[in-house]
Image (cartoon, rainbow, N blue to C red):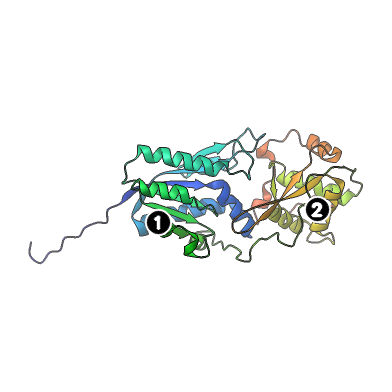
Amino acid sequence: MPGQRSQSRPRYRNAIVLIDYTNVFGVVSERSVNDQPDAVVLDLIKELHRHISDHMHLKPLRTLAFANLPPGHVKGHRATGAWLAQGIEPRFTYARSTDEASAIELAMEAMQLASDAGPDTAFVLLSGNQLFVPLVQRLQRRGHFVLAATLESPSASNHLPNDCQDAYLNADFLLKTGAMQVELDPSGDHNSGIMQASGEPSEVHPITDDIVRKTLEIIDSYFGQYEEIYLTPLLRRLSEIFADSEDEPKTLINDLEKSGAVWLEKRRGFPHNYTILMINENHPDVAEIKDSHSNKDESDYDDGYYDEDEPASDEDAHFDD
């Protein structure tokens, strides 16, 4: 009719969201002061869904999260229940937490999904610092719209091939707009200058200092379910427990290294390297502590370091015998 305007609704395109959870979790753990990295990543995924729906007219049809399941952890990933509650399909790879297995699995499944889906299906990738350039290029050449959201983007556009420069989104801002209001530390490697990697110990010595022994017990209590322990949240947790003590967490870690109970390893990351702590299960004190905790399963471990509002217990704070 004259005088009336037709109002057309925006056309939404179905999208498949693929998350390199191992990589995102690692970046958030190393560069955020928030002690709930799992919750931060889930909040990030929600914000990504909202952003692509509101601003890019993409309808998330499926969301798949890829994570490594370290050898010996047969009971699954601690975040699986939260993933399922949010409609995220879990994909696990039996590999060390720092391997690239989850990224490889993501790329392989993406190509399989692309072969089954028509070119109208969009692909959204979420990672911490994995750029997935070959995958982005191959999906684009198949006719798919691709958005690669990363928390750490290249410092200059010329660091990417010309044919996929427009595919990348710096997702850092989504952390600031989410419910948890998280901001990543831009200063670089949290562990740079803190401690040097020591390598696997060739000798072991009994731990004779009660506080050093108690530190080892605390590490196993809070982090014993992990094969590899990120150094930054570990030092942060020890600092909270030793807040009223003159004992310095870095010194205690050094003493544990000297005894051969633990060692440090550097991991290469983009653009920042990071450090992990490994526990030497062949050390007699470690074996004794592990044996005393042998009745625990992963659900029994104290994940209090993920909850910054949970105070340390009096026993942990005072170290009374």
Of the two numbered discs 2 and 1 in the rendering, the one whose residue sits closer to the viewer: 1
Residue type for callout 1: Asp
Question: Residue 6 location, x and y as percent?
Answer: 16, 60
At x 50% / y 65%, what residue is drawn? 156
Residue 73, compared with residue 177, is above or below; it is: above
Residue type for callout 2: Ile
Q: Give the residue at mark 2.
A: 253
Q: Quadrant of the N terminus?
A: bottom left
Q: Give the residue at mark 1.
A: 163
Q: Is residue 300 toward the left or the right of residue 180 in the image?
A: right
Q: Residues within 10 Å of mark 1 (few under 14, many from 20)?
A: few
Say which element carries label 2.
helix
Name the quadrant containing residue 152: bottom right
Front residue of 198 and 285: 198
Residue 311, compared with residue 74, is above or below; it is: below
Say which element carries label 1.
helix
Q: Which residue appears farthest toward the right when viewing the image? A: 208
At x 34% / y 40%, what residue is drawn? 117
